[in-house]
Image (cartoon, helix red, strand yellow):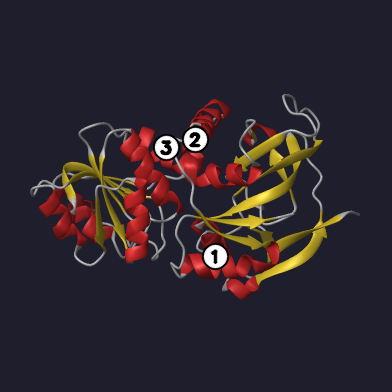
Amino acid sequence: MSTMKAIRIHTPGPEENMILEDVAIPSPKPGEALVKLEASGVNFIDIYFRTGLYPAPEKPFLIGMEGAGVVTALGEGVTGLQVGDRVAFASQRGSYAQYISVPAWMLVPVPAGLDLEMAACLMLQGMTVHYLTHSTFPLAAGHTCLVHAASGGVGLLLVQVAKMLGATVIGTVSTDAKEQLARQAGADHVLRYDGFSAQVKELTGGKGVDVVYDSVGKDTFDGSLDSLKPRGMMVTFGNASGPVPPVAPLALTQRGSLFLTRPKLADYTLTRDELLLRAGDVMRWKLDNRIQVHIDRRYSLAQAAQAHQDLAGRKTSGKLIISTT
């Protein structure tokens, strides 16, 4: 039996529960393709699975939700793919490993000119930004948006795409260094978290913003609602500070008949056509230099626990990547 290196978790919990082990290389089932991974993206959703906030159905379990590599084997019935194809994916758990078996419909071809590490950087965070700005609340000229964690992996891309679409962007960050990155990405105004809602109202002449994109969660939720204009949209799509407590619908009425949504990427890539549209747009933006990706840190598989510590401790800006070779 051939084996590979992979991070496995036997019991959900702290970073030290992430164990680098030898496990069997998976065999692709019908409709799947085996991918030899070159790089895996690090995202907050990995922390949610590791801690048990998002429970995995099996134990022990693998984590990591995006990656890129080369197809090495095809399961029965797979068409449109060949051994040797360069591919990337998101929303398939198990990328902190040297190999992964992925449903073939979820694999996106990586175009010439884009290296596999960059493809791994773009899939989950890039497509998240795409659906947030094109579908959840389609941004356009004249809109003003508030982007929390504007120097994070999603945040930096979100700022750039919002500006590409003609919106005014207000970002929040925690340090001067992170403010500089957000401004370089194109943010029109950059605030600290303390008292941000009052500053947002001041910047907008008392009106509030059209939409808040909030990946922080518990710590910013109420202030985000207070930052919105009447009939504005609150998009809470992450839990970096912890999950948002239950919300009374009257809280939305009292602030001006607000809209509230809690989206996830899988529901915005339900079909292959939608997946290819979002991934294709993001990859073209990168190839055309319309967006830049700031890779803050690279790690080996053996350093995956350190990657989680750095991300959870808000010590990073931009993208974190694990080399799986």
Indicate the quadrant where residue 62 lies: bottom right
For the residues labelled 2 and 3, the Cα–Cα distance comes to 11 Å
Q: Residue at x 39, y 56 (%)?
A: 151
Residue 244 position, x and y percent, is 34, 60
Q: Residue at x 43, y 35 (%)?
A: 290
Q: Earlier in the sequence, mark 3 or mark 1?
A: 1
Task: Please state, as top left, top right, bottom left or bottom right, where the C terminus lies in the image.
Answer: bottom right
The type of residue carrying mark 1 is Gly
Please say whether residue 195 is visible from this viewpoint. Answer: yes
Tags 3 and 1 in contact by the CB under 8 Å rule?
A: no
> Which of 93 and 110 lies nearest the eye of the viewer?
110
Q: Residues within 10 Å of mark 3 (few under 14, many from 20)?
A: many
The type of residue carrying mark 2 is Val
**Numbered disc in front, either 3 or 1:** 3
> Which of 282 and 128 lies nearest the eye of the viewer?
282
**Residue of label 2:** 282
**Residue of label 3:** 131
